[in-house]
Image (tube, grey):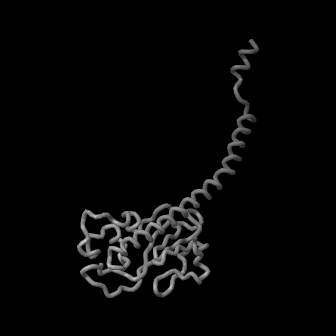
């Protein structure tokens, strides 16, 4: 009879509270690490996207008579609108629509600044060509989706700011590497 009573007994309240407390401690240790990992992943994705834009602009530069594109949407649809003249409609694009559309991605908002519009040959270059550009990625919610702000320019440099703001630029639309808010990434 004693064995039958022990089998139906179950867990005591103290045993259940101890298990809940252990789970709470494990969660308290794990959650901040997971949040830091998410921020790190978001920042890595932003830097990767900036490098993708720099590569796309370099490829576009060779197809556009030696000029960068001032209208970032032309990198996604170079044969449409006022982009590269006579660019074949079945030829490859330079950038995907997510990046060219400046849509928020991986916890970062995107923006684009163009330099001066040069005098170009309408037969070979886009009328929205530019001599320089800067592509920015700033945290959608500073401290939660990312800590640092990032930017890349036509020279191929990628900078970060420590406070989540856009890194400093010069008046000619280039990153200002002499400014303390522009920490050059290697």
Locate residue 161, reporting x and y percent.
58, 74
The picture quadrant where one finds residue 81 is: bottom left
In the picture shown, does residue 67 fall above or below 14? Answer: below
Residue sitting at x 35%, y 86% = 118
The picture quadrant where one finds residue 18 is: top right
- The reply, left or right, for residue 166 in relation to residue 128 is right
Residue sitting at x 59%, y 78% = 181
In the picture shown, does residue 2 fall above or below 103? Answer: above
Locate residue 148, reporting x and y percent.
58, 69
Q: Quadrant of the N terminus?
A: top right
| Residue placed most toward the observer, 155 or 173 | 155
Residue sitting at x 36%, y 76% = 69
The picture quadrant where one finds residue 93 is: bottom left
Q: Quadrant of the C terminus?
A: bottom right
- The reply, left or right, for residue 143 in relation to residue 29 is left
Locate residue 50, reporting x and y percent.
48, 69
- The reply, left or right, for residue 142 in relation to residue 62 is right
Locate residue 82, reporting x and y percent.
27, 76
Q: Residue furthest top?
A: 1
Query: What is the tally of numbered marks visible in this picture?
Result: 0
């Amino acid at each position: 009879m004693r064995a039958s009573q022990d089998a139906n007994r179950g867990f005591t309240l103290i045993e259940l509270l101890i298990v809940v407390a252990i789970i709470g401690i494990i969660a308290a240790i794990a959650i901040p690490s997971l949040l830091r990992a998410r921020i790190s992943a978001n920042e890595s994705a932003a830097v990767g996207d900036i490098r993708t834009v720099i590569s796309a602009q370099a490829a576009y530069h060779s197809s556009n008579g030696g000029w960068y594109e001032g209208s970032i949407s032309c990198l996604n649809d170079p044969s449409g609108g006022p982009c590269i003249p006579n660019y074949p409609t079945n030829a490859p694009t330079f950038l995907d629509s997510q990046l060219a559309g400046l849509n928020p991605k991986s916890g970062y908002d995107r923006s684009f600044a163009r330099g001066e519009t040069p005098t170009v040959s309408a037969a070979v270059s886009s009328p929205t060509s530019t001599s320089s550009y800067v592509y920015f990625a700033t945290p959608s919610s500073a401290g939660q989706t990312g800590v640092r702000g990032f930017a890349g320019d036509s020279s191929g440099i990628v900078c970060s700011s420590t406070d989540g703001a856009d890194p400093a630029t010069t008046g000619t639309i280039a990153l200002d590497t002499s400014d303390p808010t522009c920490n050059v990434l290697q």
